[in-house]
Amino acid sequence: MIDYDKDKPIAVMGMSGVGKTRIGAMLRREANWFHYSVDYRIGTRYLGEAIVDEFKREAMKAPLLRDMLLSDSIYISSNITFENLAPLSTWLGKPGDPARGGIAFAEYLRRQRLHREAEIAALLDTRLFVDKAKSIYGYDHFICDTGGSICEIVDPDDKDDRVLKALSESCLIVFIAGDDRHAQALKARFAKAPKPMYYNEAFLKRIWADYLSAKNVAEDKVDPDDFIRWGFAQLIDWRRPRYEAIARNWGVTVSAREIEKATTPAAFLSLVEKAVATP
């Protein structure tokens, strides 16, 4: 059984759409918790310059914007928020046909690797922000939204995994587990608006090779959105056992269906206490 201190910070994890950001925002807004977003930290502290540089490269292709940039008449910045991480996902990009907004697979891998380094650093910063939330801002309670890809950068079966060890020492790790209904809804939502994501590199290379073979298409002719949709359908099944292993070895599990019904901070914390008490 996990030891549980009601004042211990909480770190929530799970696939996109299971309620992590909603819960964090609710606790911040209604119960005065400090809300630490790993994705926001990645997009500001660790990849902020790379994101803005890419936007500048695109702007330099337009003569008017090029002249304005070179004369310091305009500036370009990234307006990332907890609820809108579009600058980060846009920078990650999608591999495939440049005419359809794709980037070369080698460049895609380079950005994926930078994201991995940034995500590890941002997760390891959790302890720093737990301390800052208390010592600088006077917050008594803290929640970390780990983002959707923590399971891609850790080894849940390694008791010395540095990210999970550090995170579990600072926070109670809570896995919000979606069921098949959530998975189908997520796939349907993603099919309508496919967005760039971070993948485990071995998994990414495998599905890329499989896609090229199955579609009999050259790398630079791939429809970027079609590949992203195709890969995402497999990603859910890939990630599920990895999340479950993290929860089994390092934390606790609550169901996304129960989280949907948790419309108050007290209701959410009651679910956490119940999960801790369940063998």
Image (spheres, helix red, strand yellow):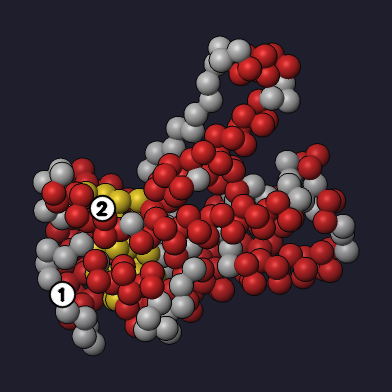
In this view, 29 is above or below 275: above
What quarter of the picture does the N terminus occupy?
bottom left
Nearer-the-camera pick, 41 or 81? 41
Name which of mark 1 and mark 2 comes first in the sequence.
1
The answer to which of 81 and 43 lies nearer the viewer is: 43
Q: Is the residue 262 above or below the residue 159 in the image?
A: above
Nearest to the eye among marks 1 and 2: give it.
2
Label 1: few (<14), some or many (≥20) within 10 Å?
Answer: few
User: Quarter of the image containing the C terminus?
Assistant: bottom left
- Give the residue drawn at x 77%, y 68%: 209
Q: Amino acid at mark 2?
A: Phe
Q: Which residue is drawn at the image coordinates 56% and 15% (left, top)?
A: 72
Label 2 residue SS: helix
Q: Quadrant of residue 169?
A: bottom left
Which residue matches tag 2?
Answer: 129
Q: Residue at x 12, y 63 (%)?
A: 7
Local crowd at mark 2 within 10 Å, few (<14), some, or many (≥20)? some
Q: Residue 68 at x, y = what percent?
A: 62, 14
Residue 52 pos. (x, y %): 55, 34
- Classify residue 46 as left or right of residue 100: left
* Left or right of 74 in this view: 268: left
User: Can the viewer see residue 109?
Assistant: yes
Q: Nearer the viewer, residue 71 or 38?
A: 71
Which residue appears farthest toward the front when viewing the image?
71
Q: CA distance from mark 1 to mark 2?
A: 20 Å
